[in-house]
Image (cartoon, helix red, strand yellow):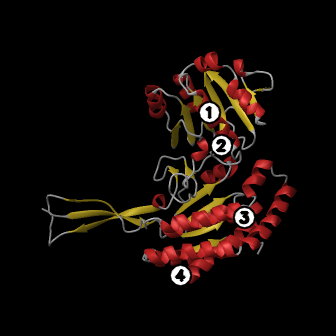
């Protein structure tokens, strides 16, 4: 299907809303069974997924995608095993629905419980990475929500087969197949229709670049869990351990450059520079990274940084670098150029670490660890829909628990109000 019409979105939305009502009371056992069956299907059909992914890679090359974006798009057997593991990890988690998060008794005799409930219907709009089809579907199912997925045009074929596997899992567990739906078109009108679907969709989760998230925030009439770009910084304090820092900086930049947790800016304390010199920058250059440096950080092999290199999400083997005078200067730089996603400090000084943590508002702050750990799976959530950078409802990795709301259950004994 290539034509997106309001009628199609109405059908998807109505089916999702009906499925959400059924999922709200589905047993934990049924949801677990569906996810495990989906994992089985993904592995059995891995050859078909890789073949479909070949079509997507060809499409991506035709669009001129960067090497980093092509890496995001690519699936091989190892990455499919990762999808399977993610599905099984989510399946093994405790079911959040019905969990009592707080309870108390008032002097009036009323007993009050706050209980987790599903949100309803989640709309997920994402780019390039086909594994999001499984991650988002799994997390929404685990949290009792129906989901409408609108994947990127580049991952259309891969996402379609992975979605089929999710439906196999639902069918095997006797759950409504409309619990996980994939918009069957590349038509961009699908995004606009989802953003206006207030009758059906309770919240939109955008997962992609600045252009996509900006469009969603500008045009959505549905509430949004914002996932802004990952302009991640590493600040190297004067007391940072040299060998720890060399390992972390290289890993944060080079492990996978196309993910939102990749470091995009290196801030080096002046005292560290005076003591250790340019070793961190030389390490990056030796690893094939283009270092766009300013001031004294410009050494042989670097490129002079331009104003817009700071505050830029490269998603490539490129990093901006600058020398700063102390933690206060590092905090000021990150406040000006960061995206409130993930920022890290390398330090052996507890006081400096505390200043860094208390004075920044990033969703994730790290000490002596690679920013590449900014991931729901690494946080023990099994998977994530994205890293929410807003301050309302969900922040940081959005897993199954973060996709719930709550209600109050109040019990009395013929209790009346004076």
Q: Earlier in the sequence, mark 1 or mark 2?
A: 2
Residue marked by disc 3 = 77
Q: Earlier in the sequence, mark 4 or mark 3?
A: 3
Viewport quadrant of the C terminus: bottom left
Q: Which mark's residue is nearer the viewer, 3 or 1? A: 3
Distance from Cα at disc 2 to Cα at disc 4: 38 Å
Viewport quadrant of the N terminus: bottom right
Residue marked by disc 4 = 173
Q: Secondary structure at mark 3?
A: helix
Whether residues under marks 4 and 1 lie with C-beta atoms below 8 angstroms apart, the answer is no
Distance from Cα at disc 3 to Cα at disc 1: 38 Å
Q: Which mark's residue is nearer the viewer, 4 or 1? A: 4
Distance from Cα at disc 1 to Cα at disc 2: 15 Å
Q: Which mark is residue 45?
A: none
Between 218 and 279, the one lying in front of the other is 279
Distance from Cα at disc 2 to Cα at disc 3: 23 Å
Q: Earlier in the sequence, mark 2 or mark 4?
A: 4
Residue marked by disc 1 = 337
Q: Which mark is residue 262?
A: 2
Drawn side of residue 318 relative to residue 9, left or right: right
Q: Secondary structure at mark 4?
A: helix
């Amino acid at each position: 299907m290539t034509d997106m019409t309001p009628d199609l979105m109405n059908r998807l939305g109505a089916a999702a809303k009906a499925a959400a009502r059924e999922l709200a009371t589905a047993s934990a056992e049924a949801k677990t069974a569906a996810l495990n069956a989906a994992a089985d299907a993904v592995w059995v059909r891995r050859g078909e997924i890789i073949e479909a992914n070949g079509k997507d890679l060809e499409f991506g090359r035709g669009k001129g995608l960067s090497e980093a974006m092509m890496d995001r798009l690519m699936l091989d057997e190892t990455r499919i095993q990762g999808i399977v593991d993610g599905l099984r990890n989510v399946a093994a988690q405790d079911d959040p629905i019905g969990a009592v998060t707080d309870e108390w008794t008032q002097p009036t005799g009323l007993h009050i419980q706050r209980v987790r409930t599903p949100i309803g219907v989640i709309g997920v709009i994402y780019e390039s990475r086909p594994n999001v089809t499984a991650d988002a579907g799994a997390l929404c199912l685990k949290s009792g929500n129906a989901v409408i997925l609108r994947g990127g045009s580049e991952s259309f074929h891969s996402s379609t087969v992975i979605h089929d596997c999710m439906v196999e899992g639902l069918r095997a567990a006797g759950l409504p197949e409309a619990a996980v739906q994939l918009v069957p078109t590349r038509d961009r009108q699908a995004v606009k229709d989802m953003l206006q679907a207030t009758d059906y969709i309770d919240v939109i989760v955008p997962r992609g670049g600045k252009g996509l998230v900006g469009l969603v925030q500008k045009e959505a009439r549905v509430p949004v869990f914002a996932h802004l770009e990952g302009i991640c910084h590493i600040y190297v304090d004067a007391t940072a351990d040299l060998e720890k820092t060399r390992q972390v900086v290289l890993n944060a930049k080079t492990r996978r450059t196309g993910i939102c947790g990749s470091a995009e800016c290196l801030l080096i304390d002046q005292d560290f520079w005076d003591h250790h010199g340019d070793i961190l920058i030389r390490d990056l250059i030796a690893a094939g990274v283009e270092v766009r440096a300013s001031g004294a950080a410009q050494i042989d092999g670097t490129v002079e940084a331009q104003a817009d290199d700071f505050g830029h999400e490269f998603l490539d083997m490129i990093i901006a670098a600058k020398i700063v005078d102390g933690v206060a200067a590092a905090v000021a730089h990150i406040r000006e150029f960061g995206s409130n996603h993930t920022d890290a400090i390398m330090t052996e000084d507890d006081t400096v670490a505390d200043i860094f943590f208390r004075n920044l508002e990033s969703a994730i702050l790290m000490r002596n660890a690679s920013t590449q750990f900014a991931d729901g799976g690494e946080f023990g959530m099994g998977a994530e829909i994205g890293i929410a950078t807003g301050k309302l409802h969900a922040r940081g990795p959005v897993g199954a628990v973060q996709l719930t709301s709550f209600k109050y259950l109040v019990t009395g004994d013929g209790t009346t109000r004076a």
